[in-house]
Amino acid sequence: MVRVRFAPSPTGHLHVGALRTALFNWLFARHHKGKFILRIEDTDVARSSEEMSRSILEALRWVGLDWDEGPIYQSHRFEIYRRAARELVERGKAYYCFCSPGEIEERRTRAQASGEHWKYDRRCLNLDENERQRLLERRVPAAIRFLVPEGRTEFTDLVHGSISVEHKNIEDFVLLRSDGFPTYHLSVVVDDIDTGITHVIRGDDHISNTPKQILLYQAFGKPVPQFAHLPLILGPDRKKLSKRHGDTSVLSFRDRGYLPLAFFNFMAQLSWSPGREERIYTVEEMVREFSLEKVSKGSPIFDLKKLEWLNSRLINEMPVTELIFHLRPWLEKDGLWSEELLSGRKEWFEKVVDLTRTRSRTLLDLSAALAPFLSDNFSYDPEAIKKYLLDDQLDRLLPVLKEDFLSLEHFTAPEIEKVLRERAEKEGMKAALLIHALRVLVLGRSVSPGIFEVLELIGREKTLRRIEKLVEVRNIIKEKEDQG
Ligand code: GLU
């Protein structure tokens, strides 16, 4: 059975690079009906924090990645790693090293000064047995180093193909530091063995670690898993994705109003494509289609425009009731939510959301666009006021239009449109003047879905009240100018 793991270090929030690793492991496990195991690699006690562990779990849950086993915390397993390292010493696969960091540094500097490439010189491997015993008894701090055998290691990476490394290029690396803490190589291999991992799927940055880890599996006498290394994600400038490209933490995408399924699609489609079309795929479709063989070797570009496109597509495609479910926390945060929107005003609200969503790329946009429908307390865009509300003709025309609106039997989109166009014609002016002014007065902004549908949904009473605020709204920019 396939058993894979995601093994983040909780030294920061989960960022998109790590999430892509988690996602591919999860898709692989679900495709093969295997197990997805979560392991928190918190052996670096000084840099790890519980808060970051919690934040990582929260990010995984938001994207919809559930795990079958774990989280396993490496910090609970220090004794197990120590025992494993000692076992390798007893079996002659590793040895105690008493060289202090200072001594090693000195030898390295000396070698490098004479132009040599230095790797650990095995001084402690060659200690005489009595001397070794004496040092151990005196409790001189000792690390445990792996004894790299002669030869070379070759493996077939499921993304990159065949990779081979000469052992003479590998130093006798440390497994257990002299302070008793394990190195990454030791803890990762011990845990992957203990949890029966069959496939290690992780970022390209770990390729150079793989030969060492294969040697460790062999030293423990355990089967070596398969490896798949995923290509590094690049920013639009083709440089390694980093903070310079904006916030790359997964939860920041939630907080910017992206839907989990759009984000899931976007992340999965970095390096892999579930089908030929550019569209939103369901999670089930992605699970069905996933295969490591189809992952491309080239570095994908992290293009936020694509995420925006997918998100706005999903906002427009999903059933409106589902969209309201995702929208609710946003409206609550903005003080716009009331339970009535799910009961007494349900039908009306669904129409409003359906009309408004066409122009929204994120839930944040959508929540802002909904404010004028749900409250009288929304903001006016000063640019829109300057552009569309300063025409003197409006002082005379808007009260007349108000009377027209009052005279309508039904305040519906077609009737509103008819009476407005007739009024414009009578006055010998463009209907656009009135339309733009109404949009700014009623919604506070210069763009919106069809204004006549908007007015119908806002309702006659509110529309008339907002038209009456012409002078007040104009004053907003005067006040701004006075202040600024
Ligand atoms: N903890 C390592 C990291 O966050 C992952 C180790 C692994 O996947 O082997 O990069």
Image (tube, rainbow, N blue to C red):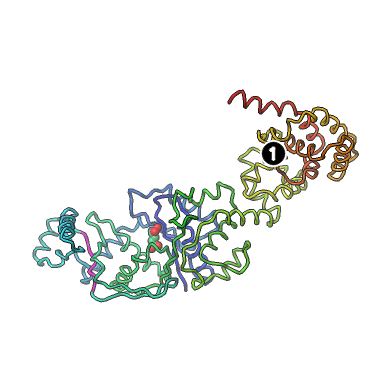
Residue in front for this viewpoint, 482 or 31: 482
User: Seen from this angle, which residue lies furthest top?
Assistant: 482
Total marks shown come to: 1
Query: Is 426 located above or below residue 321 in the figure?
Result: above
Residue in front for this viewpoint, 330 or 468: 468
Residue at (85% x, 43% y) in the render: 417
Residue 145 among magenta residues: yes
- Residue ID for mark 1: 445
Residue at (71% x, 33% y) in the render: 376
Query: Is 194 located above or below residue 75 in the figure?
Result: below
Mark 1 neighbour density, 10 Å: few (under 14) some (14–19) many (20 or more) = many
Rendering coords of residue 134 (x, y %): 10, 60
The C terminus - image quarter:
top right
- Residue 341, picture quadrant: top right
Left/right placement of residue 385 relative to residue 94 reads: right
Residue 213 among magenta residues: no
Residue bounds of the magenta highlight: 143-149
Residue at (46% x, 59% y) in the render: 233
Rendering coords of residue 247 (x, y %): 48, 48
Residue at (62% x, 49% y) in the render: 362
Residue in front for this viewpoint, 410 or 277: 277
Rendering coords of residue 411 (x, y %): 85, 40
Left/right placement of residue 418 relative to residue 332 reads: right
Query: Is 297 located above or below residue 53 in the figure?
Result: below
Quarter of the render that holds ligand 1 = bottom left
Q: Amino acid at mark 1?
A: Arg
Left/right placement of residue 107 relative to residue 226 reads: left
Rendering coords of residue 473 (x, y %): 71, 29
**Element class at badge 1:** loop
